Each structure stands twice: as structure tokens, then as C-alpha cells.
Image: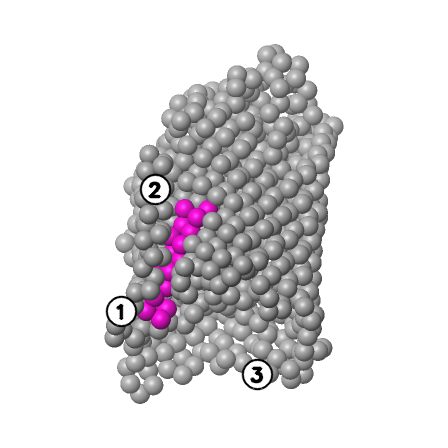
């Protein structure tokens, strides 16, 4: 069956590029060429032999795309498992969620960059909560990128470009917005502004941007308390200073801060969603009620990021040093859930820090030989510490002795050193080839501490009985590569073939667990090998009608070795050990396509889609005695949507007297993912592992609509999120639990912008 799909895909690829010379007569639908710098030098998207997608500032300015996670409705093979929680906005590309990123001690499967500066936060490997305000564009590259970027990302890279400081002209922008949510109480509000001020014309300047967003939330509290439990606020600030002491030198110093507060973290304290309404219950455990007697609290996320970029143009190359410092002094995770049939409370704190440095040398001369050389350094620390309460009183007649509290501390330290480079050689006008390599060394250290209360200790600590810390250190070396060949049969078409690899560090287990496994005759599989992806990609790009029509077809074949999974390992004489286990291998095939067509100067359509096929090819042997039975050889992998489709329409027209109108619509659908969680107990805490995956109850669908008018500096936009008022449960396992995530109900927004840029 796989060969059948591949054969037809290759036939379609050759057919499309073979007809590249055809042009529609009499159709004047030129479009502006989309230029990106994802390959470290400016190039048109249709001229780059990689699967790249660019999201423009015009799209990002709409209220329907105010979060980075919203943008991935426009990306084929992307799956988002979130409803705007800042610790859960990570995305999956090409079933990258199969790696269960929370287990591996490596870098996240998707690398995130802001203005080419790596953003790394080990506490939660997700995009920076930057929003889309004052962004120039977003560039998404699918597939391993470690030979051209600092992070050895297995699934791809997301590059967010902020608007540069203008050293010549003063400008400013003010934006105000208000929103109303179906069935909700109160309104959401948005206000922000941008100021760009030259300090010394052509030499120095400053750009300041601030945005405050107040979301009204949705759902209701089960005890009748008024208000919306999912209400949250976010403040975003960015100060950007630019200095050009010479024509060849450009220095940018940026400081950003994002502060978000939530009443209830999405996915926790949810009592019911089966009726399509989110019902949230107050805290029940003494652990949380001890600090928050009202049953509710605010979770605060405070993230600060300072970056420095220094770029100098040499005679033969561009030299750039990019440094970043992420400081997360506060990241709360106060939550409860009852998916196991009893209240389970968490009082968690997740501060962290990371420093990154990346040095790049990129050739700039006009030559058939182009190259990139780079070095990358990361020093990061994450802390997960807090308290857990398992309240089993519902099962034991409200007996207070069945409350189990514990304290934990887990500190992860990671140091990464890497050198990387790529060479692109153009043989002639039709043929070129690419070679890239990456050498990486990663040192990982984990410290784990457990504690338990003695009589008289408060539920929320501190506890009197603390066990000695366990420390484990590990050194991970890895070599990744990329090789490729590109054929351009005509001036406006190409076919490319690449093969690349990427790897993530093995899973670490505590010395005590490792000793227990060895004494039981079980060979630890966790730290035996890295999780590695070997990716083969063939793609075709074709443009016609003077750029009015663009078509891209891509097939990516990935082989995962050592997919990390949680498993319960039975050890005689003690409780089962729940840990990350290697030994699983899988195949991922991703068929992706996109079409962009300008029907006229005023009307354009776009359609992107993907079909993802997977198969488990090997699982651990009988050394793992309690491997999840849902994962079996010949079966499918998990936590991804097999089919994704996104359709967009954009229209604009002149109304007269200087007024213009515009309209846009996007509809995105994803098929149901098969669910597999870290803990696969049956509903109600039956203690039995599921023999089958649990699919989401509903397929995902999301529709947005925007309509606006503008004249001179004024822009007024009416937008509707979740036009269809979709209230399905689209996440894995949501069919098995009542606390599956649902989308915010239909939300109508009015946004007014006064732009003097």
C-alpha cells in the first residue's frame, strides 16, 4: 500500500513539473514574490529546495491569528494540542508528537527562533509566548534543520521575524480591540502600541512595542460561582535598540517580557465537557485549599528574554553572532484533576534559565558555490519542584488516612556544543547538490529529591522528611547530516530530493531505578541509544501565470529509531517503576500539498493539506514486562491527525473616496488522532493498561472570518473566531475522559488600528 501511494505521488510530481511551461492566456494575476531568509540568505520560497511556508504580516495582523499556535492552522501536517495554555502551545509536524517530547532530555522536536536567535526554555519546550503583534512574518521549515541552524530539531524550525528598527523615519501605531464570546460573561479587551524613533539618522534607533490582552474566558464553575474559569491576561513588551556604526555593521539589542496569568490552567479541574460546555470544579485537596481556601487561584507565567545580534559584512561572507538569555523566574502550575476517579492535586513551580550563543559565517559572493559555517552553544537549567497530593478518600469512606502527600524536586542541567555547516554547489542551470553535517556534544545532569510529610507538617510544605538527592550525569555525542540534489527542468519549476538525520538525547533514569532494574534481571533500555530520525524527502515546486499560480508537492519518509515511551516495568519485591523506555521503532510517511492561486488582482485562494501514514515496526522485547499493549508491531503510532486540510480565501476592493475593503476566511479540518498518554489507565483508575488506542471523540474543525475597511492610517476589522461554534473534543483520550479540551465558543472581535508607519 505504501508503494502504491509513493508511486502515484511521484507520477503526480513529474506530471506537474513537466507541464511547467503552460501559461493561461489573458490572465493578469501577478502576485508579489514571497522572499524569506530561512536559508540564512534572501531567496524566494519557490526557489528553495525545502518545504518552507511563509505567513505574512497582513495575516498576522488579523485578530483571528493573535497567537503563534493559531498560525499552524495554515500549515500542512501540523497538529496543535492546545487551547492557549502558555505551557502547552507546542506543535507537532509530521507526527513529531510520537517522540513524546516531555520524556527525552534532548532539545525539543521543533526548534524556535526569533530573528534567527534560538529560543530555548527547558521547563516547557514550546514557542515563546510572543503573540503575533509587530511581527514581519513567520517562516516554517519542515524536516530536520540541524545542519543550517543551531538546534538539531527533528521535526522542523519556526522562525519568527519581528519588524526591524527604522533608522530614518519616525512612526507609530495604536491598536484597540474588544471581543464578545458566545455564552460568556464580560468582554475581552486588547490594546497596544508601537513607537519607532530614530536617535541618530541612519545610525541608531529604538522601537518599542507593548500589547495587553484580556481574554473573557468561557465555561462555568460547578458550584455556581460567577465568572468564566478560563479567563486570562497577557502582557507583551519588546524594546529593540539598533545601531549601525558603519554600512557593514548592524547591531541589535532586544529585551522582551511576557507575563500571563490564568485562573485555571487549561486541562485541569474540568468536571465535564460532554454537553459541549466546559464545567470546572473548585479545588478539593487539602494541599491546594491550604493555600487557596476559595478553591481558585491565579497561575502566573513570567518570562524575560534578552538578545544581542551583531552582524558584519565581510568581502566574501556575512559574519553574525547571536546571543540570547531566557530568564523564567516564575512559572506556576497549580492544578487538580480527577481523571483517575480521585482528586490529584499539584502545587508546582517551574523556574528556569538558558543562555544560547550562535556564530555563523554565510557566503555572499556571486558564485556557483555557496556555504554556511556555524557554531552553537547552549547552557540551560530547568527546575520542577512542588507538592503532589493523592486524595483517595472517595474510595475509602472519607478516611483521612488515605491522603498521600509528597514533595519533589527535579533539576535538569543541559550543555550543548555543536558545529555545523552546509555547502550548495550549482553544477549548471538545471542541476545542483547540497551537503551538510553537524557535530554535537551534549552533557546532561539531573538531580532528583523526594520528601514526605511527618505528623504536624502543613499540607503545602515544607516537609520534615527529605530523602538524599540522586544525581545522574550523561554525555551524548551525535553526528547529523543532510545530502540533497535539485533539478530545475524549467525556469519556474524544480524537483528536489534530500536525505537528512537528526537525533535527541537518550532518556535518563535515576541510579536507584537503574539498580533496581539490573537486580531484577531487566536491562535498562532508557539510556542505551538516542532517539534518531532518518528523513528522506522528495518535493516539487511549480509556478505559472507570472507567479499567479504556485503548487508544491512533498513526500517525506521518516524512520524513527528508539522512540521514547513511558512503560510500567514490574520489578519483583517492589512497586512497578514508571519510566521512559526506548526500543520502539516506527515509520512516518507524510504526503503534503499546497496550492496558491490568484484568480484576479483582488481575489486569491489557498489550499494546503496533508495525509500522514505511520506504522510501528518494532517494540521492546520481554525485558520490559509491562509495555503498553496498545502499541504493537504493524500498528499505527499515536497523537497525530492523519489528515489535515486548510482552505483560505482573500479578497480586497476599492470603494472610492480613498476607502478600501478586504475580506478573508480560513477553514481548517483535522481527522481524529489516536490517543496515547503517558499514563494509560482505564477511566476511573481501574489500574489496567488499555489494549487499544483511544481516539478523540470528534474531528477538529475551526473556521475564522475577517472583514474590514481602511483609509489612510485607519483600519477597522471585524473578526469571528470559531464561526461554526465547534465544541467537539479533538484531543487524544478525550473520548475516554470527561475532561477533554474543547475550543473557546464563537468569539466576535472588533479591532481599530491607527498606523502612521
- Residue 52 visible in the current orientation: no
Other residues around mark 3 within 10 Å, as few (<14) / some (14–19) / many (≥20):
few
How far across and down, in percent of the image, does residue 370 sit? 60, 61
On the picture, is 542 further left or further right than 534? left
* Distance from the alpha carbon under mark 1 to that under mark 3: 42 Å
Gap in angstroms between the C-alphas marked 2 and 1: 29 Å
Q: Residues within 10 Å of mark 1 (few under 14, many from 20)?
A: few
Q: Is-magenta flag for residue 543? A: yes
Residue 24 badge: 1
Q: Nearer the viewer, residue 607 or 713?
A: 607
Q: Which residues are magenta?
A: 537-555
Residue 656 picture location, percent across and down:
29, 85
User: In 3D space, how far apart are the residues under numbered discs 3 and 2 (Cα atoms)?
Assistant: 55 Å
SS state under label 2:
helix
Residue shown at the point (31%, 73%) measured from the top left: 29
What residue is drawn where x is 59% and y is 12%?
572
Residue 685 vs 153, above or below: the answer is: above
Percent across and percent down for residue 602 are 30, 74
Residue furthest to the left = 26
Q: Give the labeled residue for mark 2.
A: 7
Q: Position of residue 489 (x, y in %)?
A: 41, 59
Residue 238, numbered label: none
Closer to the camera: disc 1 or disc 3? 1
Dot 1 or dot 3: first in sequence order is 1
Question: Mark 3 or mark 2: which comes first in sequence?
Answer: 2
Residue extending farthest to the top is: 573
**Residue sticking out furthest to the front:** 428
Amino acid at each position: 500500500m505504501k508503494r502504491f501511494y509513493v508511486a502515484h505521488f511521484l507520477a503526480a510530481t513529474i506530471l506537474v513539473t513537466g507541464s511547467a511551461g503552460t501559461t493561461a492566456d489573458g490572465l493578469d494575476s501577478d502576485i508579489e514574490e514571497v522572499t524569506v531568509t530561512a536559508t540564512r540568505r534572501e531567496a524566494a520560497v519557490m526557489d528553495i529546495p525545502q518545504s518552507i511556508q511563509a505567513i505574512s504580516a497582513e495575516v498576522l495582523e488579523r485578530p483571528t491569528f493573535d497567537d503563534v499556535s493559531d498560525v499552524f492552522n495554515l500549515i500542512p501536517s501540523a497538529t496543535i494540542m492546545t487551547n492557549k495554555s502558555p505551557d502547552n502551545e507546542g506543535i507537532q509536524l509530521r507526527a513529531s508528537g510520537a517522540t513524546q517530547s516531555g520524556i527525552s532530555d534532548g532539545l525539543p522536536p521543533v526548534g524556535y527562533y526569533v530573528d534567527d536567535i534560538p529560543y530555548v526554555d527547558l521547563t516547557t519546550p514550546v514557542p515563546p509566548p510572543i503573540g503575533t503583534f509587530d511581527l514581519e512574518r513567520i517562516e516554517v521549515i519542515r524536516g530536520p534543520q540541524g545542519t543550517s541552524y543551531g538546534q538539531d530539531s527533528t521535526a522542523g524550525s519556526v522562525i519568527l521575524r519581528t519588524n526591524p528598527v527604522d533608522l530614518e523615519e519616525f512612526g507609530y501605531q495604536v491598536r484597540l480591540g474588544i471581543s464578545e464570546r458566545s455564552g460568556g460573561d464580560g468582554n475581552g479587551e486588547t490594546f497596544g502600541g508601537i513607537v519607532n524613533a530614530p536617535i541618530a539618522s541612519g545610525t541608531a534607533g529604538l522601537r518599542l512595542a507593548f500589547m495587553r490582552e484580556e481574554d473573557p474566558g468561557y465555561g462555568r464553575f460547578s458550584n455556581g460561582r460567577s465568572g468564566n474559569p478560563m479567563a486570562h491576561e497577557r502582557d507583551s513588551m519588546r524594546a529593540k535598540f539598533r545601531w549601525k556604526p558603519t554600512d557593514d555593521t548592524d547591531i541589535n539589542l532586544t529585551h522582551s517580557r511576557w507575563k500571563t496569568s490564568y485562573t485555571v490552567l487549561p486541562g485541569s479541574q474540568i468536571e465535564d465537557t460532554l454537553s459541549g460546555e466546559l464545567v470546572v470544579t473548585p479545588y478539593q485537596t487539602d494541599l491546594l485549599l491550604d493555600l487557596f481556601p476559595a478553591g481558585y487561584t491565579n497561575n502566573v507565567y513570567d518570562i524575560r528574554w534578552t538578545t544581542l545580534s551583531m552582524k558584519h559584512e565581510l568581502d566574501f561572507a556575512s559574519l553574525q553572532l547571536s546571543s540570547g538569555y531566557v530568564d523564567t523566574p516564575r512559572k506556576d502550575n497549580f492544578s487538580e484533576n480527577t481523571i483517575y476517579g480521585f482528586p490529584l492535586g499539584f502545587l508546582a513551580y517551574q523556574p528556569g534559565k538558558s543562555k544560547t550563543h550562535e556564530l555563523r559565517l554565510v557566503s555572499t559572493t556571486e558564485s556557483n558555490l555557496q556555504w554556511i559555517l556555524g557554531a552553537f552553544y547552549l547552557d540551560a537549567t530547568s527546575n520542577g519542584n512542588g507538592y503532589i497530593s493523592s486524595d483517595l478518600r472517595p474510595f475509602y469512606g472519607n478516611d483521612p488516612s488515605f491522603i498521600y502527600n509528597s514533595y519533589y524536586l527535579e533539576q535538569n542541567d543541559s550543555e550543548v556544543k555543536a558545529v555545523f555547516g552546509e555547502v550548495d554547489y550549482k553544477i549548471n542551470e538545471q542541476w545542483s547538490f547540497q551537503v551538510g553535517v553537524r557535530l554535537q556534544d551534549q552533557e546532561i545532569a539531573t538531580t532528583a529529591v523526594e520528601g514526605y510529610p511527618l505528623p504536624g507538617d502543613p499540607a503545602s510544605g515544607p516537609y520534615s522528611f527529605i530523602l538524599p538527592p540522586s544525581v545522574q550525569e550523561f554525555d551524548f555525542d551525535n553526528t547529523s547530516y543532510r545530502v540533497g540534489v535539485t533539478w530545475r527542468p524549467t525556469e519556474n519549476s524544480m524537483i528536489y530530493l534530500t536525505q537528512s538525520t537528526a537525533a535527541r538525547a537518550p532518556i535518563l533514569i535515576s541510579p536507584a531505578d537503574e539498580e533496581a532494574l539490573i537486580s531484577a534481571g531487566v536491562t535498562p533500555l532508557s539510556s542505551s541509544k538516542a532517539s534518531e530520525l532518518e528523513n528522506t524527502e522528495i518535493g516539487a515546486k511549480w509556478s505559472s501565470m507570472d507567479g499567479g499560480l504556485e503548487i508544491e508537492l512533498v513526500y517525506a519518509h521518516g524512520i524513527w529509531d528508539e522512540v521514547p515511551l513511558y512503560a510500567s516495568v514490574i520489578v519483583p519485591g517492589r512497586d512497578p517503576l514508571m519510566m521512559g523506555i526506548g526500543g520502539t521503532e516506527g515509520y512516518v510517511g507524510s504526503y503534503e500539498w499546497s496550492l496558491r492561486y490568484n484568480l484576479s488582482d483582488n481575489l486569491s485562494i489557498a489550499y494546503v493539506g496533508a495525509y500522514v501514514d505511520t506504522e510501528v515496526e518494532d517494540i521492546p522485547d520481554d525485558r520490559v514486562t509491562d509495555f503498553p499493549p496498545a502499541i504493537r508491531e504493524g500498528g499505527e503510532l499515536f497523537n497525530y491527525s492523519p489528515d489535515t486540510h486548510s482552505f483560505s480565501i482573500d479578497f480586497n476592493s476599492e470603494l472610492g473616496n480613498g476607502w478600501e475593503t478586504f475580506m478573508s476566511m480560513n477553514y481548517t479540518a483535522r481527522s481524529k488522532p489516536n490517543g496515547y498518554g503517558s499514563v494509560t489507565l482505564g477511566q476511573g483508575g481501574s489500574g489496567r493498561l488499555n489494549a487499544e488506542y483511544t481516539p478523540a471523540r470528534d474531528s477538529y474543525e475551526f473556521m475564522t472570518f475577517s472583514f474590514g475597511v481602511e483609509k489612510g492610517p485607519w483600519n477597522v476589522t471585524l473578526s469571528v473566531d470559531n464561526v461554526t461554534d465547534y465544541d467537539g473534543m479533538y484531543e487524544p483520550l478525550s473520548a475516554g475522559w470527561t475532561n477533554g479540551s474543547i475550543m473557546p465558543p464563537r468569539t466576535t472581535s472588533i479591532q481599530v488600528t491607527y498606523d502612521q508607519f
